[in-house]
Amino acid sequence: MRKTKSSTAQRKAAASGRQRLRIIGGQWRGRRFEFPEAEGLRPTGDRIRETLFNWLQVQVPGATVLDLYAGSGALGLEAASRGAARVILNDASAKVTRHLSDISRTLDAQDRIEVCTGSALALLNNDAIRADVVFVDPPFAAGLFDETLQLLGQGACLAEGARIYLECPKGMALPAAFGTWFEVLREKSTGQVDYRLLSRR
């Protein structure tokens, strides 16, 4: 069988310890970027992203978007491509954020994409941020869900009518107060993942 250019590129990326991300909609549709391997880094797949951004098609254009655990940048970069006015990509790994900064420069999008290195929980206490959309997709084994959701439930950094995307292991128990903090607007499961679109009560 003849090898295609794309499959050869994917194998070369894998062999070099890097993986590839494709933006699936908007201004940069079809652009592909490599990203480094890092512990717990698990990009949201194309099919889930397509569903998510169908859910958010009204909210994203012109929005302030906070990607708390950015990793590969799949969610935040997709939002920027689809017209978000301000996207904050945050990750605790300096290796990851250096790479996200490189992508921002490649896209000539430094005026819309901010890259932060540090604690997502600290950002959630920053009442100077008024996020219209927040992505919550931390490393599954890191034990960050409960505290992240609690802080979001308090809503210090949320704009009125904000939407929150939550991606977590299938069947994961949510905090007891989850239903008092959030209303579930949409939810689906695929493979080993549950994902939901929320608003704060």
Image (cartoon, helix red, strand yellow):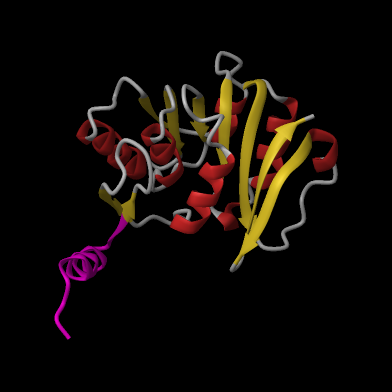
Q: Is residue 15 above or below residue 162?
A: below
For residue 179, say whether it is visible: yes
Q: Which residues, given as a range, are shown in magenta? A: 1-20
Q: Position of residue 5 (x, y in %)?
A: 15, 67
Q: Is residue 11 magenta?
A: yes
- Which quadrant of the figure contains the C terminus? top right
- Residue 16 at what x, y percent from top left? 21, 64
Image position, residue 129 (x, y; %): 55, 18
Does residue 182 sit above or below 15 in this rendering?
above
Residue at image location 38% in from the left, 44% down from the top: 25
Q: Nearer the viewer, residue 196 or 170?
A: 196
Query: Going by the image, does 10 lie left or right of 42?
Result: left
Whether residue 42 is visible = no
Please report the residue visible at 26 percent of the width from the left and 47 percent of the height from the top.
31
Q: Is residue 43 left or right of residue 110?
A: right
Would you identify the image quadrant in which residue 191 lies? bottom right
Q: Residue furthest top?
A: 128
Foreground: 122 or 34? 34
**Does the stretch in magenta take in 48?**
no
Q: Residue at x 58, y 56 (%)?
A: 140
